Image (cartoon, helix red, strand yellow):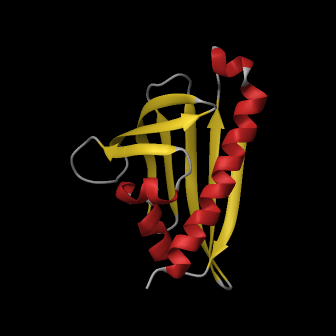
Amino acid sequence: MPRIESSITINHPAEEVFRYVTDFQNSTKWMSGVIETAITSPGGLRVGATYRWVSQVAGQKMDMPGEVTVYDAPRHYAWKSTGGPFPVSGSITCESVDGGTRITQAVNAEPGGFFKLAEPLLMRQVQGQWDESLKKLKQVLETRA
């Protein structure tokens, strides 16, 4: 199963970074390729909460419902898809370091169908989107008043 991982250090406390990235209303402000996100279950973000992501990857619009599998604020958040074109799981980890917070996002995917044929291109594009997303997140958080 291909794995993609990106990290960056942001000059903000881990609690603030974690709170921002786990607020689905902020997703389209910093995540490259993300068109729409929503929590689809009552009770907010927690283990077992369900969500819906719509994103653009490799020229394809993907609607991916999923479920939160880990929620350990302000350190770790993990999820898995429960539908969509292929199985995907991922996580975000926030670690306090000198100079702020080291945030790492990772994804594991098992592309099938069209996406299996385009797997090398897909993985490069997703890696680029994730790297770009973290740079944008850094910019957004470090320039906020």
Query: 53 or 132, which lies in front?
Result: 132
Residue 126 position in % (x across, y down): 66, 42
View extreme (right): residue? 120
View extreme (left): residue? 42
Residue 42 position in % (x across, y down): 21, 46
Residue 142 versus residue 46 in the image, above or below: below
Residue 40 position in % (x across, y down): 28, 40
- Horizontal relation, residue 42 to residue 11: left or right: left
Query: 37 or 95, which lies in front?
Result: 37
- Horizontal relation, residue 121 to residue 50: left or right: right
Residue 25 position in % (x across, y down): 35, 57
Query: 78 or 137, which lies in front?
Result: 137
Query: 32 or 71, which lies in front?
Result: 32
The quadrant in which residue 132 appears is bottom right
Quadrant, the C terminus? bottom left
Residue at position x 70%, y 19% in the image: 116
Q: Is residue 112 visible?
A: no
Residue at position x 65%, y 24% in the image: 111
- Horizontal relation, residue 109 to residue 73: left or right: right
Q: Is residue 102 visible?
A: yes
Residue 94 versus residue 119 in the image, above or below: below
The quadrant in which residue 33 appears is top right
Quadrant, the N terminus? top right
View extreme (top): residue? 113
The count of marks equals 0
